[in-house]
Image: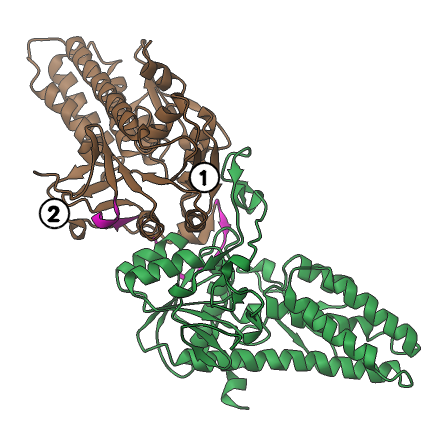
Chain colours: A brown, B green
Amino acid sequence: MSDSEKLLDTIPRALYFDNEDRFFILDQTKLPTDEMIEEQKDVEQVYDSIYQLKVRGAPAIGIAGAYGLVISLKNSLDLEIESFLELVYKNAQYLNSSRPTAVNLSWALNRLSKIAQDFPKDKTAKELYDVLKHEAILIHKSDIETCRLIGEHGAKLIREGDGVLTLCNAGALATGGIGTALAPMYVAWSKGKRFSAYSSETRPLLQGARITCWELNKFGVDTTVIADSVSSYLMKLGRVDMIVVGADRVANNGDTANKIGTSSLAINAKFYGVPFYIACPYSTIDTNSKSGTDIVVEERGKDELIYIKGQQIAPKNIKVCNPAFDVTDNSLISGFITEKGVIRPPYNFSK
Amino acid sequence: MSDSEKLLDTIPRALYFDNEDRFFILDQTKLPTDEMIEEQKDVEQVYDSIYQLKVRGAPAIGIAGAYGLVISLKNSLDLEIESFLELVYKNAQYLNSSRPTAVNLSWALNRLSKIAQDFPKDKTAKELYDVLKHEAILIHKSDIETCRLIGEHGAKLIREGDGVLTLCNAGALATGGIGTALAPMYVAWSKGKRFSAYSSETRPLLQGARITCWELNKFGVDTTVIADSVSSYLMKLGRVDMIVVGADRVANNGDTANKIGTSSLAINAKFYGVPFYIACPYSTIDTNSKSGTDIVVEERGKDELIYIKGQQIAPKNIKVCNPAFDVTDNSLISGFITEKGVIRPPYNFSK
């Protein structure tokens, strides 16, 4: 077992596919109180798991879609190839509708559908099944490798004794591997560097408190949870040496859409001279978006601000502004930690 | 009835004392779901109301202490003056221990105790009672007037159509009058100016969502609640024209301790060129503190971050950093809205 395989083995996994073609996910909606692994037995169950955010994070959803399609086929291997193909398309389309905006989901399912479409019609359903399964495993392995490389490049930026702050969850539980923003922390820690991680709780859905704290804590990284407004306070005290967060979409000029609160963190980092990094695979960079103004920000429902876990915390008839993301200006970003290395400004990814 | 009396009459009150010497508070721990007015019948009840934050906010606590002392005496008017005096001291000391760090509470109780101490010993308990009651009402009236003046001065800064953002609750429910940070909004709105108020929810204790939204909404100000990390997003969109918050303590050079998150707001405001104001009475300015480095920040318990309303949202064994306040640098503050007018930089309050 290589060092990186050993590392992967000690980090919580969002999902896995075993030698008997069984597909399992960790139900993230139950975190941090319950750690429940759930076998996915049919296509409806996988749809629900993605829809209900039991599995979440763009890379993880893509892989879940691919494995979900595979397990939805495994009891139909005695079908004629034409009927089997119809089942592939139908199930891929159905799974793709579970979270229509997740680009990795449609990307993975389209990749499998294309392979099915091009498959010789004189072969058997079983033969096609094996090819699709192989491809799903390949998608997963490729994500593991991307995360590993992001971790290796990013770990060099973390020094012994540093304070490293992150927002939301761009960790192992958002990917098939060791995460994006958290990957540098896992690699650095596994190489014996000791530092303090700060996890911003990330209102309104608290992915930082619920998920990032859970996975870092489980691995053994020294982790402190803070309210989102505390990051500035810690920077003023000199307790934060580096900020690293993930990205939902990066424009060609480096403007970056990520979880709401990222932009405020970056502005505070600039004010206090703290390096601010985005960790993301190249697949997150959308060179068709020239700048952040091309990125549309999704607004979510009122109830996320009026209730927490069913408890009312604001007047029911109050107005709510609940954007899911914000766009951070490229001038505030010290670098992008990618599988190809750390990219420094000025940014022009299409070149 | 003057305009300002009419305004005060239409705004939710934290507390009041009626013509039959009865003292009532609004139980703020029940907001925003229940609006419960509770008569305070004895000194233990007032102690508990302050201790349990049913009444909160430095000015409101001072007034509650004064009225609490008065009602604790009203059934003992047939005592000899010496025994009555002992009761005054004992109850004042007891009430003062309900929140030992609240400077307004000890200030108000010391003021009443001093009057009792200097009172001619040949007079009756009833005569001393009347003097103390008169003084408690005076403390309350003086706070009402201070709030009114802050409101008048601050209202001139709000223009028709503005977006005005605030954090935490420095409103009517924190004072005896129309508040400090919210006073300019009440005065401007009552004069017919129409603007949009934004209330930052203020993690971890959610005073913005629970209390500020409730009182502004009740009065009829157009109010939107946001997660604390959304303020920067709104500034980027140009939807915030002014920020106004309260203060817990202002140093002589203008450095200001206030609710955690204030400093991050001010840094974002500087970045986007949004005017940033502190609204506070002169009594909040501590000229003995030369600068913010003289101000000690209270750290609060873990559970405020690990649980919300009894529901666990982070791993139980995670570390927590939970400062109640932060200190905003004077260079980030556009002005102090006080009862004496708007004070502009450079700040040197002892001059």
Chain letter of disc 1 in the image: A
In the picture provided, is B222 more to the left or to the right than A224?
left
The residue at 47%/60% (across/down) is B208
Chain letter of disc 2 in the image: A
In the picture provided, is B295 more to the left or to the right than A125?
right
Report helix, strand or loop for mark 2: loop
Residue A81, position as x, y percentages in the image: 12, 13
Q: Which residue is mark 1?
A: A209
Along the viewing direction, whichever of B200 and A147 lies nearer the viewer:
A147
Residue A320 appears anywhere in the view: no
Which amino acid does the dot numbered 2 rest on?
Answer: Lys
> Earlier along the polypeptide chain: callout 2 or callout 1?
1
Against B22, is A73 above or below?
above
Against B80, is B173 above or below?
above
Residue B71 appears anywhere in the view: yes
Labels 2 and 1 share a subunit: yes
In the picture, the disc for residue B144 is none
Residue B27, position as x, y percentages in the image: 62, 63
Along the viewing direction, whichever of B49 and A231 lies nearer the viewer:
A231
Disc 2 to disc 1, C-alpha distance: 34 Å
Report helix, strand or loop for mark 1: helix
**Magenta span includes A322:** yes
In the picture provided, is A57 more to the left or to the right than B45?
left
Find the magenta span and give its range.
Answer: A309-333
Q: Which residue is mark 2?
A: A290
Quadrant housing the N terminus of chain B? bottom right
Residue B184, position as x, y percentages in the image: 44, 76
